[in-house]
């Protein structure tokens, strides 16, 4: 492992919503967008903040704060995940809702952007408490949700079970509505393949890039930050391709083996309820900061946002950063990585497999017809390949970064929808 400078928390980083706005403003200048049109996109259409009280098992009262932000719905019903996390706030939810607008547009999906959150630590709740809180939150915001209005999906701290509870609570008011959420269990209308779609989609994007760049992924050194649903699927798909996953991490710590980690053993350990560091394999323990700065071909930040900043960007030693999480690289860090010749495949492109898979599930629920997982994966690969090639062509023609190209394409599509609908 190459020695790196110690991590120092940055003091000049932009809040997440301002960071996304900077990317959009840059794209607006690139496409010559009129300033008055930009004002429509500069803020959210609707923001809801609700109080969600819960009587806990021990008799104490928990009062959680819930949010749903709907950024822009010009291209279709709002779409975005539900995040349960103790540190989430309205600023973060605004940023992620905006991000979903650009992601759905870039992927040419008929959705607008939204995001929801509950300020709570789900790990501290019993199953009964978590279910009760989810149901009450669902009822609290149900008046702005619906199959053709706003469709949530899993995000950090939530999963298929939470989506099942949310759907059932919504259906109790509006009738059986499987298409009111995505990311559900297959037994309740979920799509075979949706659970793996975000992580698998990241690898499909990397394969599309490798074909474009003339890369052979066999034995390439891969580092994956985060081993939840997204990171674990990235690791197992890379391992299946013959790439060498040398390091991974989760909340318990980070681990390195230059010869490649035993990914099936790690997955088995985590699926059994353990952490990656519990696995009976050979590895060197690292700090989370050390993992990000390992020398590798591809770094996949697949945990929370803002992990690559102006303070540690100079120490990043990857050739490519493939953004699995939302907003893992700050604008200051993004500029430094570009200056150093490190290619960043941005979140609105790289992790688009999740919302694309949600689109597949939503359409299947509306039709009451289920695809096979093979068809799901084939359709996912075909769509992601097409989008990557479109962004790559824009990059090559205009000599810009992948992030600049992705935002410019997305912004043009949203603006066309706004103008055609007569909003401006």
Image (spheres, helix red, strand yellow):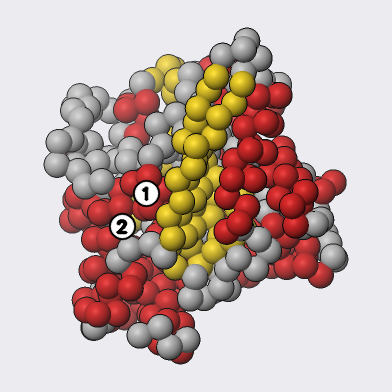
Against 49, residue 372 (above or below) is below
| Residue 75 appears in view | yes
Q: Earlier in the sequence, mark 1 or mark 2?
A: 2
| Residue 223 appears in view | no
- Image location of residue 399, percent across then percent down: 26, 74
Tell me the residue at 66%/61% (across/down): 146
**Quadrant containing the N terminus in the rendered view:** top left
> Is disc 1 surrounded by few (<14), some (14 to 19) or many (20+) residues within 10 Å?
many
Against 291, residue 182 (above or below) is below
Q: Is residue 41 left or right of residue 389?
A: left
Q: Is residue 60 left or right of residue 94?
A: right
Residue at label 2?
20
Count of number-bearing discs = 2
Q: Are the residues at dot 1 and dot 2 in contact (C-beta closer than 8 Å)?
A: yes
Viewer-nearest residue: 123 or 347: 123
Residue at label 1?
327
**Quadrant containing the C terminus in the rendered view:** bottom left
- Image location of residue 116, percent across then percent down: 51, 48
């Amino acid at each position: 492992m190459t020695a790196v400078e110690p991590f120092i928390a940055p003091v000049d980083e932009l809040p997440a919503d301002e960071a996304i706005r900077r990317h959009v403003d840059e794209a607006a200048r690139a496409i010559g967008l009129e300033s008055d049109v930009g004002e429509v996109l500069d803020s959210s259409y609707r923001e809801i903040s609700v109080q969600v009280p819960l009587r806990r098992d021990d008799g104490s009262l928990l009062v959680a704060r819930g949010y749903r932000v709907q950024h822009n719905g010009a291209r279709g019903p709002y779409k975005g995940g539900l995040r349960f996390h103790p540190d989430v706030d309205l600023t973060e939810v605004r940023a992620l809702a905006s991000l979903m607008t650009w992601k759905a547009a870039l992927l040419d999906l008929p959705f607008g952007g939204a995001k929801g959150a509950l300020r709570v630590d789900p790990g501290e709740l019993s199953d009964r408490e978590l279910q009760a809180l989810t149901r009450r939150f669902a009822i609290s915001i149900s008046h702005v949700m619906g199959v053709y209005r706003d469709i949530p999906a899993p995000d950090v701290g939530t999963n298929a079970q939470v989506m099942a509870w949310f759907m059932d609570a919504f259906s109790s008011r509006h009738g059986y509505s499987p298409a009111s959420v995505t990311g559900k269990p297959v037994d309740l209308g979920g799509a075979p393949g949706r659970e793996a779609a975000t992580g698998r989609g990241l690898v499909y994007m990397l394969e599309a890039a490798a074909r474009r760049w003339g890369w052979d992924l066999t034995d390439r050194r891969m580092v994956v930050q985060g081993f939840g649903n997204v990171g674990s699927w990235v690791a197992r798909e890379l391992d299946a391709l013959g790439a060498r996953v040398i390091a991974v991490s989760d909340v318990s710590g980070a681990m390195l083996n230059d010869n490649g980690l035993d990914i099936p053993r790690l997955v088995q350990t985590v699926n059994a309820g353990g952490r990656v560091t519990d696995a009976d394999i050979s590895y060197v323990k690292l700090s989370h900061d050390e993992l990000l700065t390992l020398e590798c071909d591809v770094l996949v930040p697949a945990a929370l946002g803002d992990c690559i900043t102006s303070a540690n960007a100079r120490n990043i030693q990857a050739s490519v950063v493939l953004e699995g999480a939302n907003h893992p690289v700050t604008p200051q860090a993004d500029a430094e990585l570009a200056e150093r010749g490190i290619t960043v495949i941005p979140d609105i492109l790289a992790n688009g497999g999740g919302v694309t898979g949600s689109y597949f599930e939503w359409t299947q629920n509306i039709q009451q017809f289920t695809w096979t997982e093979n068809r799901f994966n084939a359709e996912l690969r075909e769509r992601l390949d097409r989008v990557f090639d479109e962004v790559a062509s824009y990059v090559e023609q205009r000599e810009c970064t992948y992030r600049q190209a992705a935002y410019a394409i997305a912004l043009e599509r949203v603006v066309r929808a706004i103008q055609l609908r007569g909003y401006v």
